[in-house]
Amino acid sequence: MSAMYPELAGKVAIVTGAGRRHGLGAAMAARLAVEGCAVAIIDLGQPMGENFPAGAIGASEEMQAVVDEIVTGGGNARAFACDMRLAAQIEAVVDAVAAHFGRVDILVNNAGIGYLMKPIIELSMDEWDAVLGVNLRGVFAATQAVAKRLIAQGQGGRIVNIASQAAKSGFPFAAAYCASKHGLVGLTRVAAIELGKHQITVNAICPNHVTTGLGAWQNEYFSKALGLTLDQYMAAMRGRIPLGRPGLVTDTANACAYLCSNQAAYITGEAMNVSGGEEYH
Ligand SMILES: NC(=O)c1ccc[n+]([C@@H]2O[C@H](COP(=O)([O-])OP(=O)(O)OC[C@H]3O[C@@H](n4cnc5c(N)ncnc54)[C@H](O)[C@@H]3O)[C@@H](O)[C@H]2O)c1
């Protein structure tokens, strides 16, 4: 892949939740690095309690592997650990990124958890808070910290929020996840209105299923919950998608690079489906 948007060369991008090698965040970070951005790879860095177990989150070795892959490809990246539930840590990490790379131009709010899935009558408040804490509260805190810096820099900027098909439709066992992603689209629209006068665009991307680490976990979970084999579940999914396949991390990375480019300078407040036609409202 070669660069498509020369205006992105030299920009500094923060991508949250980018510390898993096959994740959407890593793919967007890699794509922005190809475009010439310096990229801050933000992730949790270590497991934290039962809601953030090893294997489900980006640990420091995997974060470094994402950085190494970008650097090996000729890009500029560095890993920063941060718990996206904690506003003080988010403010500190935005300061650290700006101190290291000199500025911040782009924020991609990608960190999210989608593995705490249970029927409403079984979901605990603790689990609800964990999902909302990362997927919505964390995005608010990061948007606030980065927006202040972008306004002070006075040269505009880009905020891209990774929502989901679950921001447009309901899914069983996903009350907290769907509520957080629907809320994220609301936050996107308000931020677009408030930050527009500073030439900061704010958009959401709504991917359908992508078989990342999280996506693979969801396939196992939903196929079992529906009494289907994994093959039957995936075949049914393909059948619902007009373009006949689930999403790829590169589909979302392409949309992200476009929204960060000058080609999307007049697009803000959107919640763009990247779903092969499965979602269209
Ligand atoms: N995979 C899909 O099918 C799909 C579809 C639509 C939207 N999404 C969204 O895309 C985003 C990325 O998902 P993915 O599929 O690449 O999964 P992923 O698990 O690979 O990525 C999510 C990342 O968020 C990080 N994270 C979780 N809690 C955190 C915390 N407290 N602080 C910092 N980082 C934290 C994880 O460590 C992980 O690296 C998520 O917001 C997800 O909801 C995924």
Image (tube, rainbow, N blue to C red):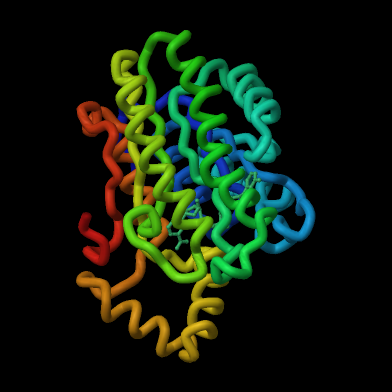
The image shows residue 203 at horizontal and vertical percentages of 33, 37
**Vertical placement of residue 190 versus 169, above or below:** above
Q: Is residue 246 above or below residue 255?
A: below
- Front residue of this view, candidates 182 and 154: 182
State the residue lying farthest toward the right: 49
Q: Is residue 260 visible?
A: no
Q: Residue furthest front?
A: 121
Q: Is residue 2 left or right of residue 140?
A: left
Q: Is 226 left or right of 81, judged from the image as shown?
A: left
- Name the image quarter holding the C terminus: bottom left
- Asked whether the viewer can see residue 208, the reply is yes
The x, y position of residue 189, in whole percent, is: 32, 34
Q: Position of residue 65 (x, y in %)?
A: 65, 50
The residue shown at (66%, 52%) is: 58
Query: Which quarter of the figure has residue 3?
Result: top left
Q: Quadrant of residue 34?
A: top left
The residue depicted at 38 percent of the width and 22 percent of the height is 157
Query: Relative to 48, does residue 170 appear above or below in the rendering?
Result: below
Which residue: 56% across, 30% down? 141
